[in-house]
Image (tube, rainbow, N blue to C red):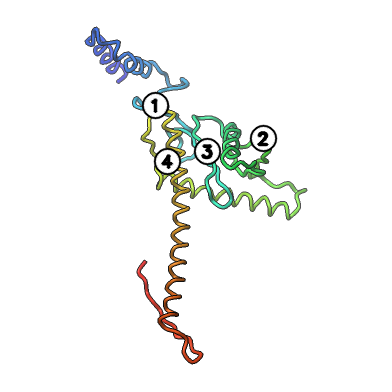
Amino acid sequence: MRTIAGRLVRDVERKLGTMVDGYRNELDLYKRVLAQKKKDKNKVYSLHEVDVQCISKGKEHKLYEFGNKVSITRTGSGVIVGALSFRNEFDGHTLDKAIEQVEKLTERKPRNGICDRGYRGRSKVRDTLIHIPKSFSKALSTYRKNKERKYFRKRAGIEPVIGHLKEDHRLSCNYYKGITGDEINVMLAAAGFNFKRMMNKWKSSFWLFLEKIIVFLNRQLHPIRGGEILQTREKWAF
């Protein structure tokens, strides 16, 4: 296949003649793909998106994924306050930029950050303490152990958030071009998640307000008589 593709590229280059300069970038890309070896670095995995990375997952059912890394930061209440796109850096090296973004957006310095074991090696970034799941020391008190477990349970809560970002807000498939497109897609997905969360809260508040109006109207239409409250039940198909 490599031999056939090489012949086609050379044939196209020869037949283009004087127009070859207009297609120089495409031809150079094809030659780069044909020349790359199995163990080369910075390989091209996609002709239409040359910035795609091969990311090792370390899972038996999914050894590799193709795309780029994304860092998501959320508060304990579930609001996303940080979303950044990276190439294929070590997870621990992304903490500085992630915390910097959180400080810029919230104008506050986070005191604690809970991460998974992929971030091991960093115990403090800027003014933020990094907590990573690990075996407890026997010297720790029961109170401290319970507090650490509570931190780690909160961290696990970001997994369904990432799932919703992928399935509901198009984080799993990016249609924007280049590295800049990756960054735009991540920010739009995070913004969409926060907007949807806010609208759901508004919706619940609206139904509560509507229920109060219905109760008020019922009291006006069916006033209390002889010390007895007349109860009416209305069924609403919401």
Q: Quadrant of the C terminus?
A: bottom left
Q: CA distance from mark 2 to mark 4?
A: 29 Å
Q: Amino acid at mark 3?
A: Ser
Which callout, 2 or 4, points at the residue further toward the start of the chain? 2
Please provide percent x and percent y for residue 66.
42, 33
Contact check, label 1 and label 3, Cβ < 8 Å: no
Which circle marks residue 71 in the picture?
3
Q: CA distance from mark 1 to mark 4?
A: 20 Å
In this picture, residue 139 sits left or right of residue 231: right
Residue at screen point 73% across, 55% down: 143
Furthest toward the top, the residue is 18
Which callout, 1 or 2, points at the residue further toward the start of the chain? 1
Q: Nearer the viewer, mark 1 or mark 4?
A: 4
Q: CA distance from mark 2 to mark 3?
A: 17 Å
Q: CA distance from mark 4 to mark 3?
A: 12 Å
Q: Amino acid at mark 2?
A: Arg
Q: Amino acid at mark 4?
A: Leu
Q: Amino acid at mark 1?
A: Tyr
What SS does tag 1 mark? loop
Which callout, 2 or 3, points at the residue further toward the start of the chain? 3
Residue at screen point 63% across, 45% down: 133
Please provide percent x and percent y for residue 18.
24, 7
Contact check, label 2 and label 3, Cβ < 8 Å: no
Which callout, 1 or 3, points at the residue further toward the start of the chain? 1
Residue 51's place in the image compared with 216, above or below, is above
Residue indicated by mark 4: 171
Residue indicated by mark 2: 126
Residue 213's place in the image compared with 196, above or below, is below
What SS does tag 3 mark? strand
Residue at screen point 41% across, 45% down: 169
